[in-house]
Image (cartoon, grey):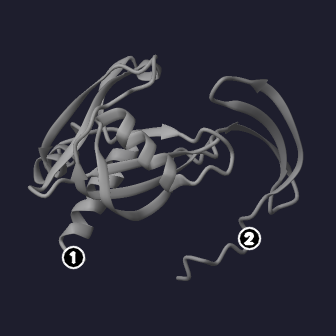
Amino acid sequence: MDIHDNAGILEKTLSSERVFDGIILHIDHLVNELPNGHTAPREVARHIGASAVIPVDAEGNVWLVKQFRAPIDRVLLEIPAGKLDYAGEDRLEAAQRELAEETGLTAGKWTHLTDIVTTPGFSDEKIGLYLATELTSGQSHPDEDEFLNVVKLPLADAVAAVLRGEIADAKTVCAVMMAEHALRGN
């Protein structure tokens, strides 16, 4: 099986209408032509994109943040992250900014792990994931509307928390598992 073969499954967008302009999201209604020639409506949440970083110190500890997430009405344990400030912003620069803002940390070494699409069933959001090492501590300065607690724990404990379902945030799950793999030298 060729994972790159898209024959017979591609859709063509025939029309697109912006139906909502929000602070973080914009909603478009599409009409797409299906491979069989029929049409189908699609609703797409447009998002500028984001960057996220998994900081791992010399002792093998990962630095995470706990914060309340209104859409799901609960506190989550996550890697530092934030949306891009403008279309086309360099994702690495955004990750560096978010790490400093949320944890006060800076990193001497940065590794791009991957880019993920978070919920492609209805959103075009893409998040760049980075591993930050060779950490230096400093003063955090979160955004005015951002209240969070920094949590430091061994990366092995974060992996175990992912496997137990205690870390549920998708970008954090991906980053923890990819960082663990990368740091093992694989």
Residue at the disc numbered 1: 185
- Identify the mark nearer the N-term, 2 or 1: 2
Of 3 and 181, the residue lying toward us:
181
Q: Quadrant of residue 149?
A: top left
Q: Residues within 10 Å of mark 2 (few under 14, many from 20)?
A: few
| Residue located at (28% from left, 43% from top) | 105
Q: Give the number of the disc on residue 56.
A: none
Is residue 9 at all visible to an observer of this figure? yes
Residue 86 higher or lower than 126, as above or below = above
| Residue located at (32% from left, 25% from top) | 67
Residue 123: image location, x then y, percent: 62, 41
Residue 89: image location, x then y, percent: 62, 49
| Residue located at (25% from left, 77% from top) | 186
Q: Residue furthest toward the bottom?
A: 1
> From mark 2 to mark 1, how far is it between C-alphas?
39 Å
Residue 173: image location, x then y, percent: 31, 48
Of 7 and 120, the residue lying toward us:
120
With 131 as the anchor, is 17 left or right in this view? right
Q: Residues within 10 Å of mark 1 (few under 14, many from 20)?
A: few
Is residue 117 at all visible to an observer of this figure? no
Q: Give the number of the disc on residue 8.
A: 2
At mark 1, the secondary structure is loop
Amino acid identity at mark 1: Gly
With 152 as the anchor, is 177 left or right in this view? right
Residue 133: image location, x then y, percent: 26, 59
Amino acid identity at mark 2: Gly
With 31 as the anchor, is 115 left or right in this view? left
